[in-house]
Image (spheres, rainbow, N blue to C red):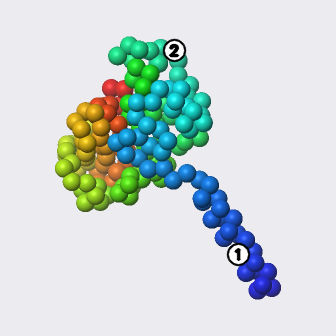
Amino acid sequence: MHKLSAALFIAFFVLACANAQAAPRWTISPDGIGPLKIGMTVEQAAKAIDAQLNLTDDEISDDPDVCAQIQPAGYGGLFLLFEKRRLTSVLITKPSEVKTFQGIGIGSSETDVKAAYTNLKIEPADFEEAPALNLTLWVKEDVSGIRFKTDIQRKVWLISAGGRSIRYTEGCL
């Protein structure tokens, strides 16, 4: 009986390890998330994640005032923001388990963000009460950065990465 239990345990462990390796381990950075890179066209982004990105003709306009934020099916907690047909920022929230290269993800503390990143621009949160904050690290101002939004419990609830659009407060605004 013990040999059968041990054999089942080993088989389960090997199967679990194989499945874990098959799942992509994405990271989020100012350059994008996983295979999605800031600056990609809608078509390139769709191909990179093998997903259909349903945008209307109005949403993929070349008009500089047109913006679209979508959530790809099957990617819980991931949002993509497109302007003039190009990916300008990526956003993650619950239930995403994606983290930065420094290990910061949804649920990380404000203290963890400040310890992992120096030169943060710290501002009051847009719609949350204090002590909620926007913690932004610019690689190059308005061109490449990452923003961590914390809640009143001082926990990260949203991470956005990309260009100037990481400053937007609600989707395309």
**Relative to 161, residue 21 above or below:** below
- Circle 1: is it few (<14), some (14-19), or many (20+) Cα within 10 Å? few
Q: Residue 141: which quarter of the image?
A: top left
- Circle 2: is it few (<14), some (14-19), or many (20+) Cα within 10 Å? few
Give the image location of residue 50, x and y in percent: 60, 36
92 left or right of 142 in image: right
| Amino acid type, residue under disc 2 in the picture | Asp
Secondary structure of residue under mark 1: helix
| Amino acid type, residue under disc 1 in the picture | Phe
- Is residue 69 visible to us here? no
- The residue depicted at 75 percent of the width and 78 percent of the height is 7
Give the image location of residue 173, x and y in percent: 33, 26
**Relative to 103, residue 62 above or below:** above
Which of pointers 2 and 1 lies earlier in the amino acid sequence? 1
Residue placed most toward the observer, 107 or 121: 121
- The residue depicted at 73 percent of the width and 71 percent of the height is 11
- Is residue 60 visible to us here? yes
The image shows a total of numbered marks equal to 2
Residue 57 - label: 2
Give the image location of residue 36, x and y in percent: 47, 38
Residue 83 - label: none
- The residue depicted at 42 percent of the width and 53 percent of the height is 99
- The residue depicted at 21 percent of the width and 48 percent of the height is 120
Label 1 sits on residue: 9
Q: Residue 65: which quarter of the image?
A: top left
Secondary structure of residue under mark 2: loop
Residue placed most toward the observer, 35 or 10: 35
Give the CA separation, mark 2 to mark 1. Answer: 53 Å
